[in-house]
Image: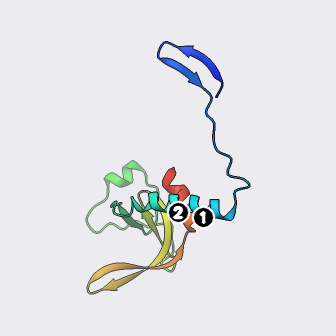
Amino acid sequence: MEKEKATGQGEVKNAEFQNFEGLTTEQNSQTEKVINSKLELLFDVMLPVSIELGRTSMLIKDILELDRGSIIELDKLASEPVDVIVNGKKIAEGEVVVIDKHFGIRITNLIAVEERLKNVKR
């Protein structure tokens, strides 16, 4: 590593990163195993899950006039899938179902795992 400059708190150096291009299949497999084992550490973490039926915008005046029985029209049609949101990020779509007097969601479309992992980083 090459020295850039010294500061009052120590030396600042350029970071060097391993080049993953040209790795053998065995090296790729080992790298994948390390990533998976680190990812497994997160399997027991609880995340908030919410279901979004739709959205709308309203004037403050109209919000203040809301009363019991008021109806708010959303941007989605009744036949459209709802969004499954995990930790603030959309990960899937589904349809609303009823299970023993409780609402549930039947997943109809999942976002690819790679895309979901990218969303977690944001």
- Looking at this rendering, what residue extends furthest in the right direction? 22
Rendering quarter of residue 103:
bottom left
Rendered location of residue 120, percent (x, y): 48, 55
Secondary structure category for the residue under label 2: helix
**Could you tell me the amino acid type at mark 1?**
Ser
Q: Label 1: few (<14), some or many (≥20) within 10 Å?
A: few
The structure residue drawn at horizontal position 33% and vertical position 84%, both measured from the top left corner, is 98
Rendering quarter of residue 23:
bottom right
**Could you tell me the amino acid type at mark 2?**
Lys
Total labels: the figure holds 2
Q: Is residue 117 left or right of residue 69?
A: right
100 or 119, nearer to the observer: 119
Residues marked 1 and 2 touching at CB (< 8 Å): yes
Q: Which residue is mark 1?
A: 29
Q: Between marks 1 and 2, how big is the CA–CA gap?
A: 6 Å
In the displayed structure, 2 sits above or below 111; it is above
Q: Label 2: few (<14), some or many (≥20) within 10 Å?
A: few
According to the image, what is the colour scheme of the structure? rainbow
Q: Is residue 37 left or right of residue 65?
A: right
108 or 72, nearer to the observer: 108
Quarter holding the N terminus is top right
The structure residue drawn at horizontal position 66% and vertical position 25%, both measured from the top left corner, is 2
- Looking at this rendering, what residue extends furthest in the bottom direction? 100
The structure residue drawn at horizontal position 62% and vertical position 29%, both measured from the top left corner, is 14
Q: Which residue is mark 2?
A: 33
The structure residue drawn at horizontal position 63% and vertical position 20%, both measured from the top left corner, is 4
Rendered location of residue 80, percent (x, y): 52, 76
- Looking at this rendering, what residue extends furthest in the top direction? 8
Secondary structure category for the residue under label 1: helix
Rendered location of residue 16, percent (x, y): 63, 36
114 or 68, nearer to the observer: 114
